[in-house]
Every structure is written in C-alpha cells, then in structure tokens.
Amino acid sequence: MKIHPLNTGNFKLDGGAMFGVVPKTLWQRTNPADSNNMCDWSMRCLLIEDGDRLILVDTGIGDKQSEKFFSHYYMSDEMSLEPNLNKLGFGLDEITDVFLTHLHFDHCGGAIQWNKDRTALDTVFKNATYWSTESHWKWATEPNQREKASFLKENILPIQESGQLKFIDRKGDYTKDVFNNFDVLFVDGHTESMMIPHIKHQDKTLVFMADLLPSVGHIPLPYVMGYDTRPLLTLSEKDKFLKNASKEDFVLFLEHDYHNECCTLQETEKGIRLKDTFSFSERF
C-alpha cells in the first residue's frame, strides 16, 4: 500500500463559525484571523494505492461553482486535484473508488464537473465507485434548513444519476474492512453518519479526520464548530475518539488545518492535548 496526500486548494471561513462558543481571544492563538474575522483552511485529500484499487478520500470543492460562490470563500490557490494526481502519474479515469466522508460541498464538490458544453453535470471519475451511506445520503438529499447551503444538489444528485453510487453498510459505530486495512468510524455530531477512515499503514493507524477534528486548534473538547448539527454529541464523540487516539498513538491526518498536516496526541492534566505536529512524509 502507498498513500499520497493531495491538497486541492485553500479557502477561508469565519473563525467564529469554526469555533462555535469559544471566544476569539482563545481560538486565534492557533488560528489567527484576518480583518474580516476569516481564518485560512486547507482541503486535503488522500490517494491510496492498494493492489488493483486506487482510492480517493474526499475531493475538495471542485471548480464548477460560480464566481460569486467562490468569492465568499476567498479561494487562494488553484483547485489542483487533477494536476496533483497527474504529478503522481495517475489520471482521473484510473481512480477506482471515491470515498466521501460526507457530502458538504468542500468535501465532495470535486467529484462532479460540467461537461465540455456546460449543458450537463458529469462525474469526474468515470470508472470509480462513489461511496456514501444510505442514512447520510437521505440526510443530504432531504436537507434540514441549517445544512441546506452545504448540501448542493449539483454536487450530489449526479452521482446517483450516473449509476456509480454505492452505500457502505453501517454496522453500529465502527465497520471493519470497508477496503483492505481500511476501517470506518461513524460519527453523527457534525452531520448524520460522517465517516472517519482508519487506515492501517506501516505498523501505524492513520486517521483521516474530516470534520471531527478540523485543526489542532479544535483538540480541547469545548472547541466545537458552529456548523455541527448536534454539538453535544460531537463533544462525546470527540472525547471518546481523542482518548483512544492518544492511547493507541494514532497519526491524525488533518483535512482542514492550514498550518499542520498531521499530528499525534497525549494525555495531560488538562485532558487530551497536542503531542506533536509534522508532515505526512516525515512519518510515512
């Protein structure tokens, strides 16, 4: 197995929304804001080579939205999924599986594109199976008012219309062997049935954090995003996960942390806290 981090671009989000009830005087220590209270965030994906499978975990925001849409998010870098794949020697049609942790636009937007005439929307990865869960799919296609702006139908419905969509069977809160050496933790605080991959690689467990832990600044338990639909549930899910991650010395791959690609945790008198930060290539 080989694993490659891919950065699909950086964007900005309101710091208050990203840290919920936590005062700015506290969260700006790790995530400094600009004059508009906006903080920098990344959109990282993982590409996993495993035998005949080429698995892409999340896809970033894509490039099909309007100029007005992108202006709200201050896209600072080219949306670079395809060029980064090409640098590794792969093309879009070689991806066999697209694993979508959840269907918010910054995680799945890169899965769908306009056709050449901009008359229809097509899947980007023509030969891939797109993976979600039945409960999350229903949640996303029948959205509540709070999440409606994050579940964009143009990112979601073409996947099903293509015939490439399959559902992972959720068995409790943890499903083993979704792929080879690839287990999934299900959490429901951020959104219904978000999937957190646990990948066994080189005698370590690499965890793709999605929005359970957007950055190292979110490690203290009360630091919960205002976007989370069930923040008290996020608290308990984080508490359980962070204790286990510290005990088992998991390597956490941070999808959104602009400053840090990976981290490990340790137990302290104040609870679970940051142990170390590093790039993926430093450990793998």
Image: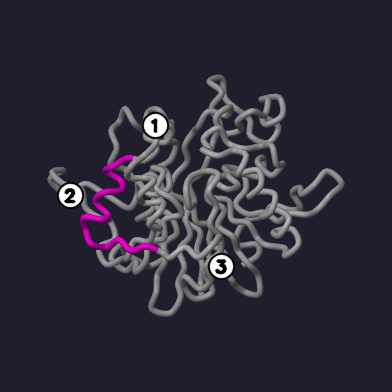
- Which residue does the numbered mark 2 point to in the structure image? 115
Which label sits in the foreground, 2 or 3? 3
Q: What residue type is labelled 3?
A: Ile
Please say if 14 is above or below 78.
above
SS at badge 2: loop
Count residues near mark 1 (Cα–Cα under 10 Å), then give few for <14, some for 14-19, many for 20+. few
What whole-number distance in Å separates the C-alpha atoms at marks 2 and 3?
34 Å
- Which one is earlier in the sequence, the residue at label 2 or at label 1? 2
- Which residue does the numbered mark 1 point to in the structure image? 145
Residue sitting nearer the eye, 192 or 196: 192
Give the residues drawn in magenta, as a range. Answer: 152-167
Which label sits in the foreground, 1 or 3? 1
Residue 29 placed where, x, y %? 71, 32
Please say if 54 is above or below 138.
below
What whole-number distance in Å separates the C-alpha atoms at marks 2 and 1?
30 Å
- Which residue does the numbered mark 3 point to in the structure image? 199
